[in-house]
Image (tube, rainbow, N blue to C red):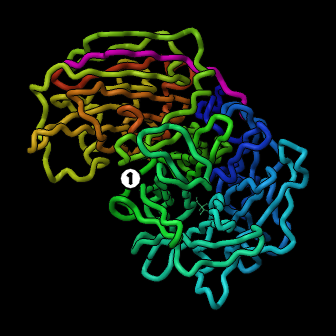
């Protein structure tokens, strides 16, 4: 990035300028990937009617900007085009359903089609004449200010399309409303929502998709049902700003979903324990993968955003599948991102003991624009601290026991964006291990931003969660994608993701030359493998 733009990303998606939020309508059409997104063409804040930005790609890494679309065109979207999703109809015909704001600022659902199916870039769209296709009426008791974000539709063998709309109602019950249609134009609300849960607030951007059981990493098209399949329901909780999900069963006779464990609320599993919201998946039929896209907003002040001239990025697309255990989803950056790894400089290390209390430099790489994979082996469990049963909030624990707080076994991990050995500024991603009363080990993974910037106006909240891994039997792995103002971390065999935004004032661009492996615990740990690549710049805006 230019020296006056040290926080612009090199390989995370962002438009050239202005405000961006949710990913919208991702799809693969005639060999081209399409990404739309919530966009304010007139400024760095979400003000005025948003339109859809549009970019296309052959690899989900390099992007070509396309003309803005879904601009105010008829009453149904005269006050803006909010989030929505694409569905490929029979005959390879894409259609998009999104939320429009009508003349009364009521939320209604709008149907759009491409003008020219011969154009693989789908540059131009038009709104169906009979819009809106779903809307609040006095009969259906829909609250017109919390009724939005249609999913990709799916079709069951009865020949009816189904789509979900996020909603909330009295006493903050969150719902995923179900509508059915034979022709994609006339939609009828089902009597019961697909699923709902009390006091969970507005459910934004629902997503509902099948995944294979038994650890099969392949993705499945949204309409497929069958015996080897579970279903995932994800919602974006408006109150906490968390993308939470459950894994469960879809009863196609009743058109009802039931989570295997627990309910959908803020205690459900999260896709990402950091800055991450309004995500959406799509099925990539070429690679046979399900791909997850998400939005990470800024942690900087509005004044700083105005100076930068932009706000918001998207995370690296992730392949997503169900873990063998069936208990959680696994996510990993799409393999194409590895094309950006430079052949040199690369830093490699195997089998090195990292002494308790030490700092070890990873030298030679472009530390502000890097991809780092590291794995640790526990050497002795003697100094492991006792776990206190009252520690039920892992994020709080991460902020109390940050990277600089010495421990028994851990904290150990990576320090990024560090300007000097003086440790004025750094972001630390690390593990800390405890022993619980039942003699089981508890592994905490944290991303500590508290020292990430000397600029006091940034939000430097520390993130983290417990990870389901046995540190005695398995190595603890960590992959961190570092990109100027993003630290996107994948821990413990892809089981936990944490995205953080950081704005170092000293460690910018080539000055961010130091990346360290640190161990602030008493016990030594071993690096079983470490590879760090400098990353090339993707062509994006
Ligand atoms: C989520 C969201 C959606 C809405 C869109 C508006 O971030 O609030 O519910 O459709 O953003 O930009």
> SS for tag 1?
strand
Q: Is residue 246 left or right of residue 469?
A: right
Check if residue 501 falls in the magenta segment.
Answer: no
Q: For the residue with label 1, is its CB less than 8 Å from the closest atom of ligand 1? A: no
Residue extending furthest toward the bottom: 138
Q: Measuring 47% from the left and 83% from the top, which residue is drawn there? A: 170
Q: Observer-nearest residue: 453 or 211? A: 211
Q: Residues within 10 Å of mark 1 (few under 14, many from 20)?
A: some
In which quarter of the view is residue 125 placed? bottom right
Check if residue 531 falls in the magenta segment.
Answer: yes
Q: Measuring 52% from the left and 54% from the top, which residue is drawn there? A: 226
* Span highlighted in magenta in the image: 524-541
Residue 274 visible in rendering: no
Q: Measuring 67% from the left and 53% from the top, which residue is drawn there? A: 24
Q: Observer-nearest residue: 538 or 93? A: 93
In which quarter of the view is residue 48 placed? bottom right
In the rendered view of the protein, which quadrant contains the C terminus? top right
Place of residue 371 in the rendered image (x, y in percent of width and height, measured from the top left):
51, 23
* Overall secondary structure of the magenta section: strand
Name the residue carrying label 1.
Answer: 269
Q: Measuring 58% from the left and 72% from the top, which residue is drawn there? A: 178
Report ligand 1 position as a quadrant. bottom right
């Amino acid at each position: 990035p230019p020296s006056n733009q040290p926080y612009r990303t090199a390989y995370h998606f962002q438009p050239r300028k202005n405000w961006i939020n949710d990913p919208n309508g991702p799809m693969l059409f005639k060999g081209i990937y399409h990404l739309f997104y919530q966009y304010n063409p007139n400024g760095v804040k979400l003000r005025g009617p948003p339109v859809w930005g549009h970019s296309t790609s052959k690899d989900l890494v390099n992007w070509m900007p396309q003309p803005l679309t879904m601009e105010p065109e008829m009453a149904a979207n005269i006050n803006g085009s909010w989030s929505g999703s694409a569905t490929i109809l029979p005959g390879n015909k894409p259609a998009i359903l999104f939320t429009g704001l009508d003349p009364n600022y009521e939320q209604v659902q709008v149907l759009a089609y491409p003008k020219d199916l011969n154009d693989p870039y789908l540059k131009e769209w038009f709104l169906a004449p009979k819009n809106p296709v779903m809307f609040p009426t006095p009969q259906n008791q829909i609250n017109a200010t919390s009724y939005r974000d249609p999913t990709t539709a799916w079709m069951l063998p009865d020949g009816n399309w189904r789509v979900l709309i996020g909603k909330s109602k009295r006493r903050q019950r969150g719902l995923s409303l179900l509508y059915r249609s034979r022709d994609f134009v006339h939609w009828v609300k089902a009597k019961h929502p697909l699923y709902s849960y009390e006091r969970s607030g507005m459910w934004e951007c629902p997503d509902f998709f099948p995944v294979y059981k038994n650890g099969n990493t392949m993705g499945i098209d949204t309409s497929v049902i069958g015996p080897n399949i579970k279903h995932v329901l994800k919602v974006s909780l408006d109150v906490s700003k968390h993308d939470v999900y459950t894994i469960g069963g879809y009863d196609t006779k009743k058109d009802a979903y039931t989570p295997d464990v627990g309910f959908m609320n803020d205690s459900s599993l999260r896709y990402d324990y950091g800055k991450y919201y309004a995500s959406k998946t799509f099925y990539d039929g070429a690679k046979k993968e399900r791909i997850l896209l998400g939005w990470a907003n800024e942690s900087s002040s509005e004044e700083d955003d105005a100076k930068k001239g932009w706000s918001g990025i998207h995370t690296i697309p992730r392949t997503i599948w169900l873990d063998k255990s069936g208990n959680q989803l696994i996510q990993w950056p799409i393999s194409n991102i590895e094309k950006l790894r430079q052949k040199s400089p690369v830093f490699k290390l195997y089998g090195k003991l990292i002494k308790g209390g030490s700092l070890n430099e990873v030298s030679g790489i472009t530390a502000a624009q890097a991809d780092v994979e590291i794995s640790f082996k526990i050497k002795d469990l003697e100094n492991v601290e006792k776990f206190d049963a009252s520690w039920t909030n892992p994020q709080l624990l991460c902020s109390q026991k940050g990277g600089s707080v010495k421990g028994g076994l851990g904290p150990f991990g990576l320090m990024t964006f560090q300007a000097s050995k003086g440790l004025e500024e750094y972001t630390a991603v690390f593990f800390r291990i405890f022993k619980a009363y039942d003699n089981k080990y508890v592994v905490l993974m944290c991303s500590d931003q508290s020292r990430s910037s000397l600029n006091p106006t940034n939000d430097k909240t520390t993130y983290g969660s417990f990870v389901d891994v046995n540190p005695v039997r398995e190595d603890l792995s960590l992959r961190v994608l570092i990109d100027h103002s993003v630290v996107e971390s994948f821990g413990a065999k892809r089981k936990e993701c944490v995205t953080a935004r950081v704005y170092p004032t000293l460690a910018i661009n080539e000055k961010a030359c130091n990346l360290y492996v640190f161990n602030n615990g008493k016990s030594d740990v071993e690096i079983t493998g470490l590879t760090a690549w400098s990353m090339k710049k993707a062509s994006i805006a």
